[in-house]
Image (cartoon, rainbow, N blue to C red):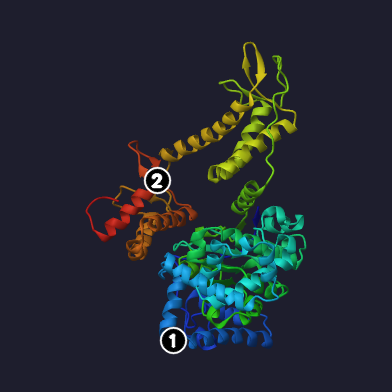
């Protein structure tokens, strides 16, 4: 499902000049705007003349002053530290048993001295093992940089929030999707808050697009806060996310702007109660009015967090470029070149949560007939070893395998078992059976064999996809301007773009580990394909090309980085 957002699709972030803004927060005052001629500053100057009232302009300037003041209060060393955190180049704290045990002991002392009469104390009386769990407490310590007092304060706020949202009976249990109400789940599926892909430093990126709620059924602030609690705590199940931290993007461009400040303070206050290590907050918008609304949340931030807020003002491509300087590649966000929000990945994530957290397994029906079956019905699934692709039951079965394939391939054994059971149940719901040949007639597949056959269907699909990805495809016609053509000395536009990107990112590439190098290479590949480019090689026949598989492209792009560092006479 796509939400349309109008942007300037003719603008390429690689063909536009970019001037560093005079204000480090992403927008400038009148004086600085007049001294810059880049497109971003031009847009800001125009926006200044947009329909903002004098009061709104004062609020906008007050927000800039507020953030500037936060930086002024930092020492030089603290500013350097914030810059490292913003760009994801800070060192992770080394946790050994001695360090953690010392932090846990200090935390226990603070909790014991201040818990009297709190919801935390009530939770401890209900289930002390849950509240005192070491992994649970370490999660809060990591979020507060191992400061015991701040950690204790957040734990108190956490249980206060959990009690308000879910009640006492769920105070000492991990919240699953089964604990959400029906309208909570509907709010979750809207996708206004999503887990985007990790940035180049491995930090979890959260995309928040409050404007999507305007296009959905009206939800209460309680619905929104329960969804926020669920998806953040779900992300924090990853130890990597706890250690590396999270990056939030507040997105309000085109039709996806928020219209009022209702609920903004409540959302931010609730998020502060959750044990996430906030590395940065990026506000992206093309309307100065959005800054005015965002200031509501900034005003309730602690000064230390304000120094990690960055404001990006301009079109989608301009904001994407600015985000990329902080290690957030455009392809890590569920946005296409025209600003459409793609919900496919989010919906698959929701589906995987349902599969993983559903407590009751769907049973596989046992065979209903012991006698041979002479004539299958149209909804039966036929295992014959031959081609039965036109049979309605087999087409239905194939569509279910396609529907669940991505969740199945990335899921745990428990999720896979649940998917197998659900597919079986869906076939039986329409009166279908799983049949195999038995002489001249048919018989139902025994339960032990049925599970294996359904699992084999997923393996077969994955193998066919892998085979197609590993083979070069022969294509005809002229190379497109955006194509990257390997093996030629005369470069076209796409090949020049590849070499420019390699040159711009070479220093960063050399400093990364192997996994992060792969992510950088994939980001460059995605950038080129987003502009309509292909990675091709001249075929022996004149006028024909070989479209290379992804693994071969990754190898060749990686070689480009090595060649740039170590000049060679070889062709690309």
Relative to 399, residue 107 above or below: below
Query: In the image, which is nearer the foreground, mark 2 or mark 1?
Result: 1
Relative to 416, residue 70 above or below: below
Q: Horizontally, is 132 left or right of 172 in the view?
A: left
Label 2 crowd (10 A; few <14 / some 14-19 / many >=20): few
Q: Which residue is mark 1?
A: 75
Q: Nearer the viewer, residue 540 or 305?
A: 305
x and y percentages locating residue 30 in the rendered image: 54, 87
Furthest residue in direction left, as rendered: 569
x and y percentages locating residue 419 in the rendered image: 63, 40
Identify the residue at horizontal 75%, vertical 31% (top origin).
430
- Figure quadrant of residue 434: top right
Q: Which residue is mark 2?
A: 551
Q: How many marks?
A: 2
x and y percentages locating residue 345 in the rendered image: 59, 52
Query: Does residue 258 appear in the picture of this structure?
Result: no
Relative to 101, residue 20 above or below: below
x and y percentages locating residue 265 in the rendered image: 68, 76
Query: Does residue 143 appear in the picture of this structure?
Result: yes
Name the mark on residue 275: none
Relative to 365, residue 469 above or below: below
Q: Horizontally, is 432 left or right of 541 in the view?
A: right
- Figure quadrant of residue 123: bottom right
Point out the tag, 2 or 1, that comes first from the N-terminus.
1
What secondary structure is marked by label 2?
helix
Mark 2 and mark 1: span between their CA atoms? 47 Å
Q: Nearer the viewer, residue 419 or 16?
A: 419
């Amino acid at each position: 499902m796509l939400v349309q957002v109008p942007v300037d699709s003719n603008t390429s972030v690689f063909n536009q000049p970019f001037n560093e803004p005079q204000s480090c927060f992403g927008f400038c005052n009148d004086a600085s705007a007049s001294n810059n001629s880049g497109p971003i500053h031009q847009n800001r100057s125009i926006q200044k003349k947009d329909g903002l009232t004098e009061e709104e302009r004062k609020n906008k300037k007050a927000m800039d002053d507020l953030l500037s003041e936060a930086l002024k209060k930092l020492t030089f060393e603290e500013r350097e530290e914030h810059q490292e955190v913003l760009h994801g180049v800070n060192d992770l704290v080394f946790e050994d048993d001695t360090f953690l045990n010392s932090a846990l002991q200090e935390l226990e002392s603070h909790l014991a001295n201040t818990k009297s009469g709190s919801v935390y104390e009530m939770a401890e009386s209900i289930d002390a093992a849950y509240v005192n769990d070491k992994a649970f407490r370490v999660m809060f310590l990591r979020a507060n940089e191992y400061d015991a007092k701040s950690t204790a304060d957040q734990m108190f706020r956490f249980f206060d929030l959990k009690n308000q949202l879910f009640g006492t009976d769920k105070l000492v249990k991990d919240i699953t999707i089964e604990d959400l109400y029906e309208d909570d789940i509907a709010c979750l599926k809207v996708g206004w808050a999503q887990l985007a892909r990790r940035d180049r430093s491995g930090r979890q990126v959260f995309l928040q697009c409050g404007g999507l709620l305007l296009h959905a059924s009206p939800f209460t602030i309680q619905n929104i806060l329960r969804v926020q609690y669920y998806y953040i705590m779900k992300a924090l199940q990853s130890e990597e996310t706890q250690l590396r931290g999270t990056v939030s993007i507040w997105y309000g461009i085109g039709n996806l702007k928020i219209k009022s400040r209702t609920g903004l303070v409540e959302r931010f206050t609730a998020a502060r109660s959750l044990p996430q290590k906030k590395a940065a907050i990026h506000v992206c918008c093309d309307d100065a009015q959005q800054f005015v609304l965002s200031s509501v949340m900034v005003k309730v931030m602690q000064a230390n967090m304000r120094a990690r807020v960055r404001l990006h003002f301009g079109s989608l491509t301009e904001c994407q470029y600015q985000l990329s300087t902080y290690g957030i590649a455009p392809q890590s966000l569920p946005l296409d070149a025209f600003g459409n929000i793609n919900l496919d990945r989010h919906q698959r994530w929701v589906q995987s949560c349902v599969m993983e957290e559903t407590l009751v397994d769907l049973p596989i029906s046992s065979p209903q007939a012991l006698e041979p079956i002479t004539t299958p019905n149209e909804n039966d699934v036929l295992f014959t070893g031959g081609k039965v692709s036109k049979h309605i039951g087999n087409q239905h079965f194939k569509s279910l395998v396609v529907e669940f394939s991505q969740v199945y391939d990335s899921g745990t054994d428990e999720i896979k078992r649940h998917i197998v059971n659900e597919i079986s149940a869906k076939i039986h719901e329409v009166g279908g059976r799983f049949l195999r040949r038995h002489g001249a007639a048919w018989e139902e597949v025994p339960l032990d064999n049925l599970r294996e056959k359904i699992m084999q269907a997923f393996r077969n699909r994955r193998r066919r996809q892998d085979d197609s990805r590993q083979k070069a495809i022969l294509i005809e016609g002229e190379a497109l301007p955006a194509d990257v053509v390997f093996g030629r000395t005369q470069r076209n536009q796409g090949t020049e773009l590849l070499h420019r990107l390699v040159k711009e990112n070479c220093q960063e590439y050399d400093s990364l580990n192997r996994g992060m190098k792969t992510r950088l290479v994939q980001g460059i590949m995605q950038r080129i394909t987003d502009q309509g480019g292909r990675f091709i090689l001249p075929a022996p026949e004149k006028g024909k090309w070989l479209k290379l598989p992804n693994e071969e492209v990754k190898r060749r792009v990686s070689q480009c980085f090595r060649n740039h560092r170590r000049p060679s006479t070889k062709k690309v």
